[in-house]
């Protein structure tokens, strides 16, 4: 079973898989190379790889006198603060 990263979201493959992938560079026998590729392919197909793509936007504390647009960095940008839109 793959280890969990420090962030707890990305799965990291064991060093055995990395070693098998590196061994393909020097493998000259077609049958052994194909067998290694097939074994790696089955192992990797069985894995569920999680790629965190969503970044939650935080809601800001607002006043009716200001319009502060949400930003992808979750930080209010003072240069974009303006009067409320009507």
Image (cartoon, helix red, strand yellow):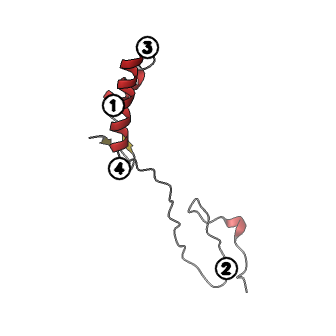
Which quadrant, please, contains the N terminus?
Answer: top left
**Which residue is under mark 2?**
66
Give the vertical position of 62 relative to 2 (above or below). below
Q: CA distance from mark 2 to mark 3?
A: 64 Å
Residue 7 visible in image: yes
Q: Secondary structure at mark 1?
A: helix
Left or right, residue 1 beside residue 13: left
Depth check: give the residue in front, 40 or 34: 34
Q: Secondary structure under badge 2?
A: loop
Give the distance between the C-alpha atoms of the residues marked 1 and 3, in whole angstroms. Answer: 17 Å
Category of crowding for the residue at label 1, using alpha-carbon neighbours closer than 10 angstroms: few (below 14), some (14–19), many (at least 20): few
Q: Quadrant of the C terminus?
A: bottom right
Confirm or deny contact between disc 1 and disc 3 (CB under 8 A): no
**What is the C-alpha distance between the residues marked 1 and 4?**
27 Å
Comes first in the chain, label 1 or label 4? 4
* Residue 83 to residue 12: above or below: below
**Residue carrying label 1:** 39
Q: Is 10 in front, or is 72?
A: 10
Q: Quadrant of residue 67?
A: bottom right
Element carrying mark 3: loop
Q: CA distance from mark 2 to mark 1?
A: 60 Å
Q: Which mark is residue 26?
A: 3
Of circles 2 and 1, the one toward us is 1
Residue at coordinates 67% horizontally, 79% vertically from top-left? 66
Report which residue position mark 4 lands on: 8
Circle 3 residues within 10 Å: few <14, some 14–19, many ≥20:
few
Dot 4 or dot 3, earlier in sequence: 4
Q: Position of residue 71 (x, y in %)?
A: 62, 64
Q: Is residue 9 above or below residue 43?
A: below
* Pointer 2 or 3: first along the chain: 3
């Amino acid at each position: 079973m793959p280890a969990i990263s420090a962030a707890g979201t990305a799965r990291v493959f064991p060093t055995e898989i990395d070693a098998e992938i590196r061994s393909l560079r020097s493998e000259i026998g077609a049958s052994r190379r194909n067998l290694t590729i097939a074994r790696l392919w089955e192992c990797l197909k069985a894995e569920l790889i999680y790629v965190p793509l969503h970044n939650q936007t935080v809601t800001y504390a607002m006043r009716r006198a200001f319009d502060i647009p949400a930003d992808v960095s979750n930080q209010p940008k003072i240069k974009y603060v303006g009067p409320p839109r009507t």
